[in-house]
Image (cartoon, rainbow, N blue to C red):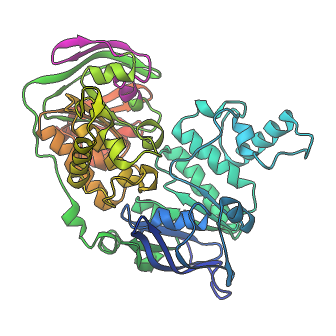
Amino acid sequence: MAAPETPNDSAGPLVATVDLEKQFAGTKALKGVSAQFLRGEVHGLLGENGAGKSTLIKILTGVYAPSGGQILLEGRPVEINSPLDAHRLGFGAVYQDAELVHGFTVGENILLGNEPGGAFVSSGAIHEEARRILGEMGIELDVYRLASTLSAAETQLVTLATLFHRRYKLIVLDEPTARLSAHEVDILFGLIDRFRKQGVTLIYISHRLGEIRRICDRITILRGGRVSATLDHSEITEDRVTELMVAKSTEDLRIENDGFSTGDVVLDVENLSAGNLEPLSFRVRAGEVLGITGPVGGGMEQVARALGGITEHEGRIRIDGKPVTISSPYGSLRSGIAIIPEDRRRQALFPNLSLANNIALPMLENLSRLGLVREDRKSRYAEGIIKRLAVHPDLPALPVKFFSGGNQQKAVIGKWMGAKAKVYIFVEPTAGVDVGAIKEIYLTILELAKAGAAVVLVSSAAEEIMTLSETVMVVHDGQLVHHAPKAECSHDQLLTLSLGGRPKLAV
């Protein structure tokens, strides 16, 4: 896709915010945000987690009401007090943690609220129309599958399909590629190009600068609840964006794993197979970070699912030389394994519970006396973790659903820091996380390794694998295609391996 051209704004912006403010429990998330979104442009929205991106788009889509300021549609003030108001104005969104009606089929979800046939709804007509929509989008998916059986990536694509056939003026895409394969990303970008040509305005939130440069006409950067800058496409560079986001250079944010592994094997896996994963074996020593990468859906995820007790598997697993049987998440935890999953909202957090309660959950037994939880001990414990991980805002009593994606990820990691697990498994730990929070998460992972834990990092991001790992494995089409020290594989070679090639590696 060629570099986008900035749309003509001679008729004025489609949507504008004027001095928009939002306050939560005495903390201002937005502090007078003014921005303009032109007709038919793809407008990137960037910023650290907690900078106000999610708050801004949730105001535009009616999830939150603003505390002050205005929203203008084609120059006229509008009030958006609910998602229904947003829908009537032609505003839609696909959030980072997309949700569908689990008991409905793919087709029923796509046509929900827009079923053909009026009062006489025909299941056949619904699924035939859904099949046509998916075909036009280039997505191969059984329209009769239940939404509850879909992967995170498939859920994202189905959610996009629900917007494809509706006449929206403004569509927000929040980290839409975080769980997509390279092929699925190409499908998405083709759809975005089609929306743009139809005059639809898209607000695109992503922390992947390559994507931003590829498809965005302009970007707006938020910092601390305020607009830091708006840049044209030609002005978007890594150093410029990083400086505006976090007031730090990219050099300040670079870290490396200097190597903390010892000779003691903590995790010993032999002939592990699950799902489409063919038998593979590996060991992880105390202090070692083993990076496992490959294409999304290529089998690397099955390693984490098997060790986390989420899926059935075959093979032998030993912890500190002792055989363990893992048939459930509880069995995994009892064996000394803590897993930090990719889908934090559905698999790791209770959104309506407070930040403090989410963090303290695994430790309640240790924070209790005579079967009763000591609230003072729980609060002190949670507050210590919150400060240690720099969770923002520092509001332990606030429900975790009100925190940004990066700060929710910190909360998930914080849950297990006091558990003193022998093995930590991180699955896509920085998906949808900004550059500043990424460094904090990386340092936490290395801190766990330095303390003697065995760490398994499952990530589709080659740069992340090269940054954190001492040893690297590549799984493609269910097969182990590479397993060696990081020094024996360059970043470009790792990318080639992940895509299915087998280049001659440096020795």
Q: Which residues are magenta?
A: 302-326
Query: For this view, does 78 lie left or right of residue 273?
Result: right
Task: Verify whether residue 147 appears in magenta.
Answer: no
- Quadrant containing the N terminus is bottom right
Q: Residue at x 50, y 45 (%)?
A: 180
Residue 244 lies, in percent from the top left, at 33, 75
User: What residue lies at 25% left-to-right and 66% top-to-bottom?
Assistant: 250
The residue lying furthest to the left in this view is 263
Tell me the quadrant of the picture where the C terminus can be found: top left
Most foreground residue, 230 or 232: 230
Identify the residue shown where x is 49% and y is 75%. Answer: 21
User: Is residue 271 shown above or below 203?
Assistant: above
Q: Is residue 467 visible?
A: no
Q: Measured along the vertical axis of the image, is residue 410 above or below residue 9?
A: above
Asked if residue 324 lies in the magenta stretch, the reply is yes
Horizontal side of residue 260 vs 175, given as left or right: left
Q: Give the x, y percent position of residue 247.
A: 27, 73
> Residue drawn 23% across and 39% down?
417
Give x and y (percent) for residue 396. Answer: 33, 53
